[in-house]
Structure formats: structure tokens, C-alpha cells
Image (cartoon, rainbow, N blue to C red):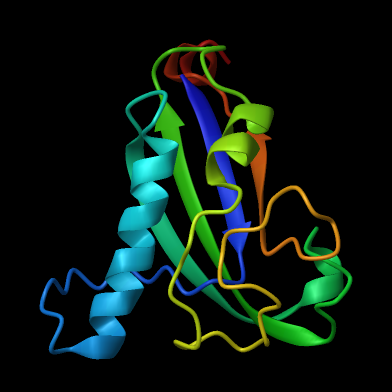
Amino acid sequence: MEFFTCYTLIDITCTGVNDPAQSLPYQQYQNFNTFLQFIGLRTQPLDIKVERLIDQPLDNYKFSSTYTGNGDVWKITWSIETVGYVGINELKQDADGIPIHTNLTETVDLTSSVLETKDARKRNLYFVKENRPTQTQLFDK
């Protein structure tokens, strides 16, 4: 298995709300669904988890240098079964330019209302491929 993490300044809270009358939680959930759709373009994501990291020093992350000070960061993690099937470059390519809902609960002023992965001056999300031990490696110790 391979493991991935995406860090973003975009509110991707997994509210589960499908009712457009509930504007905020509906739009948050639509952003989450957008993430699921683009990470699922090439493979089936498994074990998907979303966390909101409150009041983070943005200098500790790889967002655009436009974003300074502290802010909330959303972290989405997932795994895939097929090793080597998708990489960071493919994820960046698939995500870049996708429209998203903004002005939700983000704590930074986003420079764009689309996912920005390629333009370093606007980057509002990025991906990390994680190295985690397999179950076999855990039991071999």
C-alpha cells in the first residue's frame, strides 16, 4: 500500500450535509467531495481521513509565501492499494485549476477560488507521499 497526505488552506470539512438549504455545511461537503473525485481519478482511495489543524504557523507548510502568520490547515490522508500507480505529479496535475467554494471557515484570504498546485505564488494545497511500514514490517520487529 501507499499513503498520501494533502495539506490545504481550503475548508474541506466532511460534514455529510447534502441539503443546499444548509449553505455552509453543504459547501464544505461539496469541497470534500471535490477532493474525493480528483484523488479518485486514477485509483480508489482508501481509509480517507480529514482533520482541521487549528491556528498553525503557515511558515511550517509549503503553501504560497503569500500566506503568512497563523491559519487553519486542513489535512486529508488516504491510502491506495496499487504501489507506484499514482504519484505527486499526477495528483498535482489532476487537482490544479478545479473550482472550489471559498469564504467558508478559512482563516486566510485565498488568492484564488480554484485549487492551486502549480503556481508557487498561489499554492493553496500540496501533496506528500508518506512512508509507513506495512503490517508485515510491524510484526517482523
Q: Residue at x 74, y 60 (%)?
A: 123
Q: Residue at x 47, y 74 (%)?
A: 11
Q: Is residue 120 left or right of residue 23?
A: right
Residue 106, horizontal then vertical, whole percent: 55, 84
Q: Residue at x 61, y 89 (%)?
A: 107
Residue 5, horizontal then vertical, whole percent: 57, 45
Q: Quadrant of the C terminus?
A: top right
Tell how many labels.
Answer: 0
Residue 120, horizontal then vertical, whole percent: 84, 56
Q: Quadrant of residue 130?
A: top right
Q: Is residue 22 visible?
A: yes
Reply above or below: 80 against 54.
above
The residue lying toward the viewer, choosing from 51 and 110, is 110
Reply above or below: 114 against 111.
above
The residue lying toward the viewer, choosing from 44 and 93, is 93
Q: Quadrant of residue 53?
A: bottom right
Q: Quadrant of residue 31?
A: bottom left
Q: Residue at x 60, y 63 (%)?
A: 8
Q: Is residue 128 left or right of residue 6?
A: right
Residue 3, horizontal then vertical, whole percent: 52, 32
Q: Is residue 131 visible?
A: no
